[in-house]
């Protein structure tokens, strides 16, 4: 399964014994927040790494260009942060080459940030620029739905470039 979960399960089994782990699964349920906290240990909430994670926590998956534009980071700084978060299994890359928070950590990542203080306007502008520059061929429905959510949360007028579903 998910590498941090497997390591964590191994550590729990080694420290408390396999029988205890199997009879009381609660510690395994709590691993998500611990893994994410360990990955961000010592990171200030307004640091560049936290900014990247905040954008991806609410708008995964996103292309590199949109993450860079929304966070205002240079290509070198963004590459370093994304690499580190991928190496810690916090982020992964999907088949389109977009970056996303790993499924087991999405909820935990979202709880680290205040959804209402997330820079939705910057994200909406970055997504709109991406759609204008690249079109909908790359990212398609995923990008258009993210654009819709960002524009709604930024309180911007709707455009023809957005697609939404009732779940949005």
Image (spheres, rainbow, N blue to C red):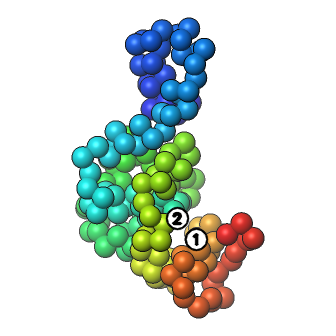
Residue 55's spot in the image, x, y percent?
Answer: 44, 64
Q: Is residue 58 visible?
A: yes
Q: Which mark is residue 165?
A: none
Between 92 and 165, which is closer to the camera in this rendering?
165
The label number, if any, that marks residue 146 in the structure image: 1
Label 2: how many Cα within 10 Å (few below 14, some 14–19, many 20+): many
Residue shown at 50% from the left, 34% from the top: 30
Q: Is mark 1 on a helix, strand or loop?
A: helix
On the rendered image, what quadrant is the N terminus found in? Answer: top right
Q: Where is residue 63 in the image (x, y as percent from the top left)?
A: 48, 65
- The quadrant of the picture occupied by the C terminus is bottom right
Query: Relative to residue 74, is residue 19 depicted above or below?
Result: above
**Which residue matches tag 2?**
59
Task: Tell me the CA gap for discs 2 and 1.
Answer: 6 Å
Residue beneath the point at 31% across and 73% down? 72
Residue 98, given in percent of the width and then of the height, sits at: 50, 59
């Amino acid at each position: 399964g998910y590498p941090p979960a497997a390591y964590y399960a191994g550590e729990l089994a080694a420290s408390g014994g396999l029988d205890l782990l199997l009879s009381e699964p609660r510690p395994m349920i709590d691993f998500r927040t611990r893994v994410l906290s360990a990955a961000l240990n010592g990171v200030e909430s307004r640091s560049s790494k936290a900014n990247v994670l905040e954008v991806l926590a609410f708008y995964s998956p996103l292309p590199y260009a949109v993450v860079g534009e929304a966070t205002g980071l240079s290509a070198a700084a963004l590459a370093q942060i994304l690499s580190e978060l991928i190496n810690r299994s916090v982020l992964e890359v999907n088949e389109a080459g977009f970056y996303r928070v790993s499924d087991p950590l999405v909820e935990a990542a979202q709880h680290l940030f205040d959804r209402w203080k997330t820079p939705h306007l910057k994200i909406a502008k970055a997504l709109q620029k991406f759609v204008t520059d690249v079109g909908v061929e790359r990212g398609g429905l995923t990008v258009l739905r993210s654009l819709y959510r960002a524009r709604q949360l930024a309180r911007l007028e709707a455009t023809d470039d957005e697609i939404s579903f009732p779940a949005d």
